[in-house]
Image: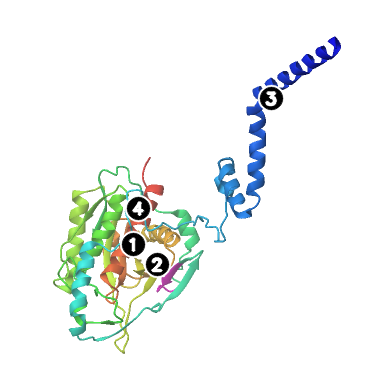
Amino acid sequence: MKKQLVIFFSNIVIILGCAGICVNYMPVIYSYIYPLAHFSARLSSSESFYNGLKSEISDYIPKAVENNTTAPIERDTEVMNVTGSKDSDDGYNITKTPSDVAELMKKAEKTVKKAKSKGKTSEEAYQGGGTIISYKGIEIQSKIPSKVYKPNIGSLLKQDSDLMISDKSKPSVLVYHSHTTEAYTLLDTGYYMSSDARSSDASKNVVRVGDELVKELERAGFKVIHDRTIHDTDYNSSYDSSRAAVEKYLEEYPSIEVTIDLHRDDITYSDKTKVKPTAKIMGKKAARMMIISGCEYGLVKNFPDWEYNLRFDLQVQRAVNEKYKGVMRPILFSQRKYNMYETHNSFLLEIGTDANTLDEACYSARLFGNALGELMNRKYVKQ
């Protein structure tokens, strides 16, 4: 009997001990059993299980490798020698139509139907004679006999310009317009009116286009003089008038190294169709441009340093072409002098024709100024 009592009380102690152990370790056991049961329940729905599992482990998966849609993956691709429409972090958009030009276009839309057209416009390429000389995407349209002088583009690029700007705080560029009243159409309609060809209104002619060029060069940090004088009141003496202005500025600002005589071209066929050389740059129409570089030949005398200009012109042509492919026509190289002899870095720039719109011309001027400013900062500013 005594032995049975000992066994009975021993069992009681063991049972109480086991109960105590279970009570003490129940939280730990629960922490394992509950997720297992929860996991089993979630398996009943594969979609909800997947979404929940994704949510719980997403913090441990790098975002770059997470792609759970059927849409194609978008990747940023670096494009060399192209500037986006937003050229800087300040919100500047090089493709945007200036507000004053947009207002002129808006007004023109109200009257265009009432105006009488003189002919159609065409965006076809136009050469105009001469021999095309090419080198790595750079073209010269030479009207000089090859036996007299044949430009070696590669060699001229290596020789480079003698331009050196020692102080950017002083004026280094002069922009002027020998044919100041050359103007543009306002709307891209496929035809033109004779009234578009010339205007003394600086908001509609090459002066307005020159403003855009000047702004871009100033954005690049250069001081620019913009001569807005009308020089073609007497068309036959327009270069005499502009020459006097150039020489006045050179005397007043001897720091000026680059002079740009900004014009627009006129290409009209016998059937009265006008050509408007056009390129699409960053989705927007731009008036194609042409640098004119002269030399001493035939009737042109006293122009011994003309090749310095050609060297600089080729550097500019390459810089603009590389950044905005297709916007430049070949350099026109011929027996011309104009005012190019005034410095070693002078050229005449034709931006579009009278059949191009003012907006297209202003856009091209910004593109040209942007590329020219970068070129000069990169190669021709004394460090």
Chain-order first, disc 2 or disc 3: 3
Amino acid under label 3?
Answer: Cys
Q: Position of residue 341 (x, y in %)?
A: 29, 60
Chain-order first, disc 2 or disc 1: 1
Mark 4 crowdedness (10 Å alpha carbons): few <14, some 14-19, many ≥20: many
Chain-order first, disc 1 or disc 3: 3
Left or right: 51 as drawn, with respect to 93:
right
Residue matched to label 2 = 283
Residue matched to label 1 = 95
Q: Is residue 115 visible?
A: no
* Distance CA(mark 1)–CA(mark 4): 17 Å
Residue matched to label 4 = 373
Residue range corresponding to the magenta coloring? 139-145
Amino acid under label 4?
Answer: Gly
Mark 2 crowdedness (10 Å alpha carbons): few <14, some 14-19, many ≥20: few
Report the number of numbered marks: 4
Residue 96 part of the magenta-drawn span: no
Chain-order first, disc 1 or disc 4: 1
Quarter-of-image position of residue 102:
bottom left
Residue matched to label 3 = 22
Mark 1 crowdedness (10 Å alpha carbons): few <14, some 14-19, many ≥20: many
